[in-house]
Image (spheres, coloured by chain):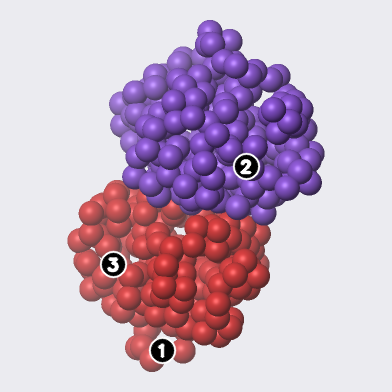
Chain colours: A purple, B red
Amino acid sequence: MIKGVLFDLDDTLYDSSSFADRARREAIKMMIDAGLKATEEEAYNVLQRIIKQKGSNYNKHFDDLVKAIMGHYEPKIITMGIITYHNVKFALLRPYPDTIKTLIALKKMGLKLGVITDGITIKQWEKLIRLGIVDFFDEVITSEEFGLGKPNKEFFEYGIKKMDLNPDEAVYVGDRVDKDIIPANDVGMHAVRILKGKYKNLDGNCAYEVNNLFEVVDIIKKLKKS
Amino acid sequence: MIKGVLFDLDDTLYDSSSFADRARREAIKMMIDAGLKATEEEAYNVLQRIIKQKGSNYNKHFDDLVKAIMGHYEPKIITMGIITYHNVKFALLRPYPDTIKTLIALKKMGLKLGVITDGITIKQWEKLIRLGIVDFFDEVITSEEFGLGKPNKEFFEYGIKKMDLNPDEAVYVGDRVDKDIIPANDVGMHAVRILKGKYKNLDGNCAYEVNNLFEVVDIIKKLKKS
């Protein structure tokens, strides 16, 4: 008997990768206007390398970019990048077209809903609030709050417990095979992979795969019957 | 012979105190809507105490407010406060009505212009960019960059040197007697106090006092003649 659904956030409930990428490209254009001595492609490649090395939650990407290209610190150029990045990201931020419809349908089925997400607590809540979907969720669990992130099984077990569910009563929906699907299956949850975001073309053996979030509703209907 | 003018930023070139205060009040209202168990006045008083204890650049004011009132961490309420505070602050952010007119007049007089401000470099640059006044200034000097803030004389001396001026060739404009006017006079600059912001009613013995920024233009005209 399925009683609850837990979701990954970034690239599962909204388009994170492509929005962030578009915001970074706009930021670079403004930085070049402000005096950054590089072509858009050069700057973009340096920025990608910095993000890869330092992770996406590092908060000095643009500082490092300017230092790498100019050889010194230039507050005006850095600040222009940061402002533009945030303005564009917030301007683009919205749920997938079928996210809210899906959450409503699941609520109507009487299911508990939750989020299990890697990231900084306040940043992840900010996204949920700005996306207008925060009130659908009974629990929001972040890696910062728990102290350990995906793919640790303890993180998923903590989430299920907070939702007051047994693993086999819970469905997990996420976009990454390595960090979402495998650990969710390992703890005994049903796991659905959504083929969105930058990992959508990676191979992976999953029992359930969907192209759009709303397909999750049908999968859960079938699971509830079984 | 006056050759340059250096400005304080917050409350001298734009209304910082009142905008921040209004943004905090709006943030508190939204936090109460989101479940903060306090009246607006109670929450406001607790927040004021936290800001006084931790300083205005401390970045966990709203975390501490929620913990003080609720006894525990509530990410939804905290995040609602942070988002509302920033949205309202940016919505209200603009120069004083005569700031740009004043900067244009001073530029036309052939003067070098600069900013000497306490604060985090990127945050102060962000304000200058969002205010639309960054390009008026030949130099922007922050306490974070220099490593020492107001009222240290070395900070003012560093600013004058970066502008390539002698102290008696430079006018300093700021709103605080203790942190702006006294140290500027001590290093040999001409200092003008602008009666704005939360310190405007404090006593202080200043050679030049103005109610509005544009009056600085006349003072400098007189100083140039003498």
Give the amino acid type for the residue marked by disc 1 in the picture.
Leu
User: Which residue is most to the top?
Assistant: A203
Q: Chain of mark 2?
A: A
Look at the numbered disc 2 and give the secondary structure of its residue: strand
Residue at coordinates 52% horizontally, 41% vertically from top-left?
A166
Q: Which residue is mark 2?
A: A4
- State the residue in front, A200 or B182: A200
Q: Position of residue A115 (x, y in %)?
A: 56, 42
Tag 3–tag 1 contact (CB < 8 Å): no
Residue B50, compared with residue B162, is above or below; it is below
Res A90 seen here: no
Disc 3 packing (10 Å; few <14; some 14–19; many ≥20): some
Q: Chain of mark 3?
A: B
Res. B9 image quadrant: bottom left
Q: Which residue is mark 3?
A: B150
Residue at coordinates 37% horizontally, 32% vertically from top-left?
A152
Q: Are marks 3 and 1 on the same chain?
A: yes
Q: Position of residue A135 (x, y in %)?
A: 67, 54
Q: Is residue A73 left or right of residue A203?
A: left
Q: Which residue is mark 1?
A: B202
Tag 2–tag 1 contact (CB < 8 Å): no
Disc 2 packing (10 Å; few <14; some 14–19; many ≥20): many
Cα–Cα gap, marks 3 and 1: 18 Å
Residue at coordinates 44% horizontally, 80% vertically from top-left?
B46
